[in-house]
Image (cartoon, rainbow, N blue to C red):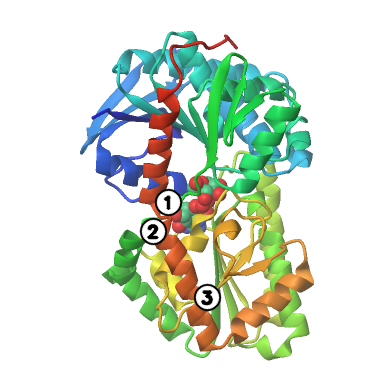
């Protein structure tokens, strides 16, 4: 059997539980198959020291291989191009992008460094699976060094429409780099259709058959592979002592209230200020919710060295303060805002104790919190998911209450509906969503992507890759 080699910006010990969708999903895949996980160590090489060393460590069935970055490469590749250009533009936020011309060189340099260090570690029949926007040109760099193995790419974040993509200086270079992969996977049909429109209109690619295009002397297959969760594992986590303890504590503490929950990384794509304004609107216009509805909003610290995040942090603190100041009573605070990461083992208890989850990103590749919330519910008395129509998850979960997070009144109305939804309707919506979660779980995601990669490569003979 071929060995699986996963490459992503960061790696994590798959034996430990991690916070973060990508880490959780990949740990799951590698724990089952074994293989190698390659990426950045998270460390900056000491001043004057070349970041040449490769660190290797065995973690159960998985070999973890990492390298350090120099400060300059980290700033240009990670902070600059990945998180200052690709993250905002791919989340439709051109206004937040910083198109500094120096960033792309660092981005390319680090991708070349990854390719140089990875190549000697590869075996002829390895299957390489590259993850996310940090590493779009990696396959092209590997091919330039003679790599002929199967290489697949999965984009965890959205792909914007062609004209928005075209705002990135060098966008043609980026998309051309995708043609060095054998299979490119997206989270949703919407992302896939943006890719199709881009390659046909901007790159004049020829559609060969549905999901297959030819351009730059290469054929690429692309498809939608919505990422799922490990439903059984999450249900076990829900029944484990840490989660049940959390559940009981929350139930006791909020016995006279109806809990709403939000769990996000603190990121402008997650729509947190808009969510809080919708909640304020609810309290203002539906007085029956005052003294009862309590929003627990957990926002874990994320990328605090990027300035847009500091502004967001201040905005949130001020919004929470003003809502609590204006509506709070001596014995009731409408918002509990927690700027910390909550241990993964405790999250299911919080979800299960909540009547409503607010998952209202302005844009999101998928959003696994939505799926985890559903999986953690008591099927006899389930909570209600209020979900942004702009999360990838909305394509799969039409039984959620879908909202436009920019529409404050509409979102407030949906929250009220969720708080008042009769048991029978809650049950039937939950049942339908559980069916989808089970059918398209993380194992389905992995198996279907890898099966697609195997068959995509079989038709491509020899490395006909045109240099970038
Ligand atoms: P993220 O943007 O990190 O991931 P998401 O899908 O919501 O977002 O995954 C978050 C994961 O981290 C979940 O497992 C959740 O439980 C955990 N998490 C989130 N906030 C947390 C908090 N405050 N405390 C503790 N744990 C927290 C990217 C894309 C998503 C895509 C995933 C997977 O942006 O759209 O769904 O990758 O592909």
**Would you say the residues marked 2 and 1 are in contact, meaning their CB atoms lie under 8 Å apart?**
yes
3 or 2: mark nearer the eye = 3
1 or 3: mark nearer the eye = 3
Rendering coords of residue 317 (x, y %): 66, 61
Q: CA distance from mark 2 to mark 1?
A: 6 Å
Rendering coords of residue 444 (x, y %): 39, 49
Q: Earlier in the sequence, mark 1 or mark 3?
A: 1
Q: Does mark 3 have its CB less than 8 Å from ligand 1?
A: no
Question: To which residue does mark 3 refer?
Answer: 429
Q: Is residue 273 above or below residue 290?
A: above
Secondary element under disc 3, as helix, strand or loop, is helix
Tally of numbered tags? 3
Question: To which residue does mark 1 refer?
Answer: 19
Q: CA distance from mark 1 to mark 3?
A: 28 Å
Rendering coords of residue 299 (x, y %): 55, 58
Q: Rate crowding at label 3 as few (under 14), some (14 to 19) or many (20 or more) other CA atoms within 10 Å.
A: many
Q: Earlier in the sequence, mark 3 or mark 2?
A: 2
Q: Residue at x 30, y 71 (%)?
A: 239
Where, by quadrant of the figure, is residue 458 drawn? top left
Residue in the foreground of this view, choosing between 62 and 334 = 62
Q: Residue at x 26, y 43 (%)?
A: 32
Q: Does mark 1 have its CB less than 8 Å from ligand 1?
A: yes
**Would you say the residues marked 3 and 2 are in contact, meaning their CB atoms lie under 8 Å apart?**
no
Q: CA distance from mark 3 to mark 2?
A: 25 Å
Question: To which residue does mark 2 refer?
Answer: 344
Rendering coords of residue 318 (x, y %): 71, 63
Residue 241 visible in the shown view: yes
Q: Residue at x 33, y 75 (%)?
A: 245
Residue in the foreground of this view, choosing between 160 and 290 = 160
Secondary element under disc 1, as helix, strand or loop, is loop
């Amino acid at each position: 059997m071929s060995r699986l080699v996963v490459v992503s910006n960061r790696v994590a010990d798959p034996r430990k539980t991690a916070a973060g969708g990508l880490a959780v999903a990949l740990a799951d895949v590698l724990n089952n198959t074994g293989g190698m996980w390659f990426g950045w160590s998270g460390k900056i090489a000491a001043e004057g020291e070349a970041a040449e060393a490769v660190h290797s460590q065995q973690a159960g069935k998985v070999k973890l291989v990492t390298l350090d970055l120099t400060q300059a490469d980290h700033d240009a590749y990670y902070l600059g191009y990945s998180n200052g250009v690709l993250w905002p533009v791919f989340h439709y936020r051109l206004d937040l992008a910083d198109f500094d011309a120096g960033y792309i060189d660092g981005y390319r340099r680090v991708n070349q460094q990854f390719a140089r260090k990875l190549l000697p570690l590869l075996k002829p029949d390895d299957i390489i699976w590259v993850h996310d926007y940090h590493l779009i040109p990696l396959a092209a760099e590997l091919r330039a060094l003679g790599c002929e193995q199967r290489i697949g790419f999965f984009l965890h974040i959205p792909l914007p429409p062609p004209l928005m993509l075209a705002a990135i200086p060098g966008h043609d270079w980026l998309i051309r780099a995708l043609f060095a992969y054998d299979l490119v996977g997206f989270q949703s049909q919407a992302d896939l259709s943006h890719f199709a429109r881009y390659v046909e209109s901007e790159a004049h690619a020829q559609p060969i058959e549905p999901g297959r295009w030819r351009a730059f002397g290469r054929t690429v297959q692309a498809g939608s592979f919505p990422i799922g969760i490990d439903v059984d594992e999450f249900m076990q986590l829900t029944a484990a002592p840490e989660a049940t303890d959390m559940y009981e504590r929350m139930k006791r503490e909020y016995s006279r209230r109806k809990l709403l929950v939000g769990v996000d990384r603190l990121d402008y794509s997650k729509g947190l200020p808009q969510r809080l304004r919708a909640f304020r609107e609810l309290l203002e216009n539906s007085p029956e919710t005052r003294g009862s509805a309590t929003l627990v909003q957990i926002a874990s610290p994320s990328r605090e060295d990027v300035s847009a995040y500091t502004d967001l942090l201040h905005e949130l603190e001020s919004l929470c303060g003003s809502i609590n100041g204006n509506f709070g009573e001596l014995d009731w605070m409408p918002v509990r805002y927690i700027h910390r990461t909550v241990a993964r083992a405790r999250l299911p208890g919080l979800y299960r104790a909540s009547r409503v989850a607010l998952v209202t990103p302005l844009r999101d590749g998928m959003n696994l919190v939505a799926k985890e919330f559903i999986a953690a519910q008591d099927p006899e008395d389930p909570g209600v998911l209020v979900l942004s129509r702009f999360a990838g998850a909305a394509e799969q979960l039409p039984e959620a209450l879908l909202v436009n997070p920019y529409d404050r009144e509409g979102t407030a109305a949906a929250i009220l509906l969720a708080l008042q939804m009769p048991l029978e309707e809650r049950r039937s919506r939950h049942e339908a969503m559980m069916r989808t979660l089970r059918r398209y779980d993380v194992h389905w995601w992995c198996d279907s992507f890898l099966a697609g990669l195997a068959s995509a490569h079989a038709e491509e003979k020899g490395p006909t890759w045109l240099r970038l």
